[in-house]
Image: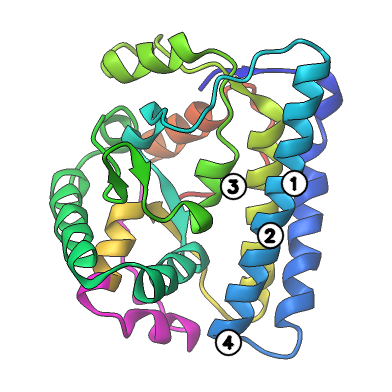
Amino acid sequence: MAANSDSEYSDVGTIFFQDGYQLAKGFIGKGISRIAILQLMGAAYESIDGLIDSFRKRCEREEMTVDCQKGCSYCCNQAVLASNHEILVLSHYVDEHVPAKVKEDIKTRTADKHEITRDMSAMEFLHYIHPCPFLEKGNCLIYPVRPMACRCYLSGNLKSCRNQNDNPDDRSAIAELYEFPLRAGRGMNEGIRSALMEAGLIPSEWLLETFMAAVLKNPQILKLWLDGNTPFQIRKLTPEENKFMREYYDPSGKSTGSNTG
């Protein structure tokens, strides 16, 4: 995935990893609970949103283009990886704010996409174009609680997004993304994952539709996870897949420590 690089951002992943870690410690220091994680992620998302808003303003001052606007949904057709704690927030939002009929539609779309992607290799699902189960008529149904991967995706070239969307088999067709938001968001989420792991939870990250299909089928799966179990089943990646995913998400080689295996 291409990014607009800037040497001043070389330590961003490490800095925001620490921010995420300390933020999580503050919310779960007295114990793990659903409420604590909901509050933690609310604070994390608010922090990242504020950061990206400031970055947008900087781009405006420096006459750098930001082409992400309401109504554009090219990125909503790509693979989205989400962590357990993000799925907990999504599930809570769907239960509290999404009408029953719409929830049934989401459940169907989620199951359908999961059936398509479940047996794909990383090389296949990262280039597979299919609408997100939460996308409806070009709008995100869970926008306030969208995963970190969605929040930190900031394009500097609409044409490149369209090209990637329209040519999924062309691996040279890559959206031109800003590196700073990507590193900040990923770093913060990894810091949160690290703190949760220290607190006794088993963090994992996988395709959004896979985790959500499991939750919509059995809501108790989240309670099992909060109790320290590993109910979310993901397959082990091959060395080739791990290498491909590292290079796909961080072609510069300056990893923030993410491990999707």
Q: CA distance from mark 4 to mark 3?
A: 24 Å
Q: Residue at x 52, y 44 (%)?
A: 149
Looking at the image, is 73 positioned above or below residue 7?
A: below
Residue at the (49%, 68%) spot, across then down: 89
- Image location of residue 81, percent across then percent down: 43, 48
Asked whether the viewer can see residue 58, the reply is: yes
Q: Secondary structure at mark 4?
A: loop
What residue appears at the point 43 percent right and 74 percent down from the top-left corner? 92
**With 5 as the anchor, is 146 left or right in this view?**
left
Q: Rate crowding at label 4 as few (under 14), some (14 to 19) or many (20 or more) other CA atoms within 10 Å.
A: some
Q: Which residue is mark 2?
A: 44
Disc number at residue 50?
1
Front one among 71 and 202: 71
- Report the coloring of the rendering: rainbow
Q: Could you tell me which secondary element the residue under label 2 belongs to?
A: helix
Q: Amino acid at mark 4?
A: Ser
- What residue sits right under mark 3 in the picture? 258
Alpha carbon separation for disc pair 4 and 2: 16 Å
**Label 1 crowding class (10 Å Cα cut-off): few <14, some 14-19, many 20+?**
few
> Which circle, 1 or 3, is nearer the viewer?
1
Q: Please tell me how crowded label 2 is: few (under 14), some (14-19), or many (20+) other residues with Cα within 10 Å.
A: many
Q: CA distance from mark 1 to mark 2?
A: 10 Å
Residue at the spot of label 4? 33
> Could you say whether the residue bearing mark 1 is in a helix, strand or loop?
helix
Q: Is residue 261 visible?
A: no
Give the amino acid type for the residue marked by disc 2 in the picture. Ala
- Residue at (42, 28) in percent of width and height: 72
